[in-house]
Amino acid sequence: MVLDNEGKRAEAEAVIRETLAIHRKNHGEDHPWTGMDYCTLAGTLGAQNRLDEAATNYRRGLDILEKTAAKRWEQAWAHNGLASILAGQGNLGEAEIHHREALALAKKVVSADDAHLLGLIDSLANILRKNGKLDEARPLAEEAVAICQRHPDRVEPQARRAFATLRDVLKDLGDTASLEKLELTIQQTDAKPKPAQTPEPQAK
């Protein structure tokens, strides 16, 4: 939403709440559009650091999306959003569960090499690192970086986060040799021109 991107989050919240009220009136509480509205509201609340309210709305929206068998990409988006809020609250264990579910759902929609999985793979790798599961985090972080290299249209900004996650994992593992190779790869990537980004996939 443009208002949200411009930082006018209070205005954005009001618009989203109005849309939610309309969809609840016209379609009922248990409808995919209503579920998506709850999740969109949750994202705006999270951006305002109102994490408890955000988590409540994500959970309500996700419950509706699952109950109404909404499109998998929408469910994946909701799981990922809730996971980010939970991580912000310090609930890393439950955040990991939702990051795993988000990636599993998304992989049912797009191929394993699809660039749109990059953010989900990186998020899971990062939460696994924070939970001390470095052996599981490393291959996921490496997979995210490999996707970046195969899809240069994803260089900004997700790729930078993916490279940073792998860097942190390698540092935690004490793998100096691999870390040096990664730093060289980052330098080479930064030197390349930045192509236009690809559009988001159609929800299924």
Image: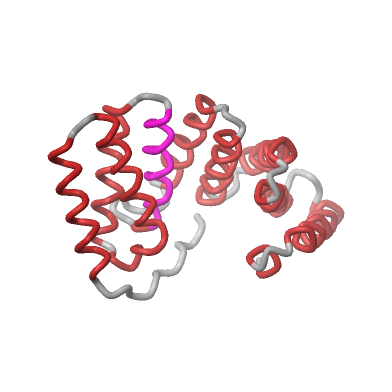
Counting from the top left corner in percent of width and height, residue 195 is at 33, 75
Counting from the top left corner in percent of width and height, residue 17 is at 81, 55
Is 7 included in the stretch rendered in magenta? Answer: no
Q: Is residue 124 above or below residue 148?
A: above
Secondary structure character of the magenta stretch overall: helix
Q: How is the image coloured?
A: secondary structure
Would residue 162 appear left or right of 95 to someone viewing this image?
Answer: left
Write the residue at 16% across / 46% down: 180
Q: Is residue 189 above or below residue 77?
A: below
Counting from the top left corner in percent of width and height, residue 145 is at 27, 51
Would residue 70 appear left or right of 98 to someone viewing this image?
Answer: right
Chain part drawn in magenta: 116-130
Quarter of the picture containing the N terminus is bottom right
In the rendered image, the residue lying farthest to the left is: 177
Counting from the top left corner in percent of width and height, residue 159 is at 35, 57
The front one of 181 and 138 is: 181
Write the residue at 25% across / 36% down: 170
Would residue 198 appear left or right of 182 to someone viewing this image?
Answer: right
Image quarter of residue 115 = bottom left
Write the residue at 68% across / 44% down: 49
Q: Is residue 30 above or below residue 158?
A: above
Write the residue at 20% across / 42% down: 179
Would residue 56 appear left or right of 127 to someone viewing this image?
Answer: right
Is 117 included in the stretch rendered in magenta? Answer: yes
